[in-house]
Image: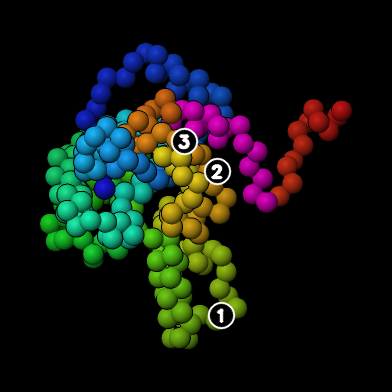
Amino acid sequence: MKELSLTKTKQTDLDKKRQKTLIESGVIPEHIAIIMDGNGRWAQSKGNIRLFGHKVGVDSVRDITEACAQLGVQYLTLYAFSTENWGRPSAEVRGLMRLLVSSLRKEADNLHRNNIRLVTIGQMDRFPDDCIEELDEAIRLTENNTGLQLCLALSYSGRWDITEAVKKIATHVQEGRLAPNLINDQMISDHLSTAEIPDPDLIIRTSGEYRISNFLLWQLAYSELYITKLYWPDFRRNELYEAIQSFQKRDRRFGKVRKKNKDEITQ
């Protein structure tokens, strides 16, 4: 869990110039998803307890969220707590739950002032009542905002997401409301927890691990991957810009043959 802090900071002229260049140089991803990995290892490398890394990760959450909003990214999904994370030491889990409550209580108004809409995906019923209450309050407060949509994946698992979608579709078949031969990719997508969110264009993973750790397994079918060795607390807007620049250079064919441009055809 990463503590949210979206207090607005003064943007430098140099940063505005770099963002302008980035916007003019290519397509800005509509949806960016991030596996925010390495908080604990970052803290331990500095001789601190793991929870310290989660607390420091607040600066990266703030900076990346602000930068995405400034660039015109429409959806930002943060893998904040996986179902596997429940298996961590109980003291760390309790600390993460406290961070969730305190950060939501502190930052809900900032989200609202910045026109950011908060949503969540995952098994929310596994969280303590005070966490659910703070989440519900922040979601209600920001539900009509029209800017960046910040989606927190909490107690989330890609396999769980697909399993739940299959259960819903199977129920429709069992009740006679759906013929099995009508089940297709779009129907499965429509029954996932992300049904109202487009699939990610770009997924970023910090800490240098080359895996997606049970995150958005269905939705990432054609997402562009960007892996950085930096731990999450060290990942800031300049690194985000590098990830987007890399994305802009990709040839996204979605399994098809690349279309030749006019110059290539006339050669």
**Label 1 SS:** helix
Q: Which residues lie in the magenta part? A: 240-255
Image marks 1 and 2: residues in contact by CB distance under 8 Å: no
Residue indicated by mark 2: 224
Residue drawn at (37%, 43%) of the image: 37
Q: Earlier in the sequence, mark 1 or mark 2?
A: 1
* Residue receiving disc 3: 228
Number of other residues with Cα within 10 Å of mark 1, as a class: few under 14, some 14 to 19, many 20 or more? few
Which residue carries the number 1 mark? 180
Query: Between disc 1 and disc 3, whose residue precedes?
Result: 1
- Closer to us: mark 1 or mark 2? 2
Q: Can I make out residue 57 in this image?
A: no
Separation (CA) of disc 3 from disc 2: 13 Å
> x%, y% of residue 221?
56, 54
Q: Residue 182: horizontal and vertical position, in percent? A: 58, 75
| Residue type, label 2 | Glu
Instruction: Identify the residue at horizontal 21%, vertical 41% (top origin).
Output: 49
Q: Amino acid at mark 1?
A: Pro
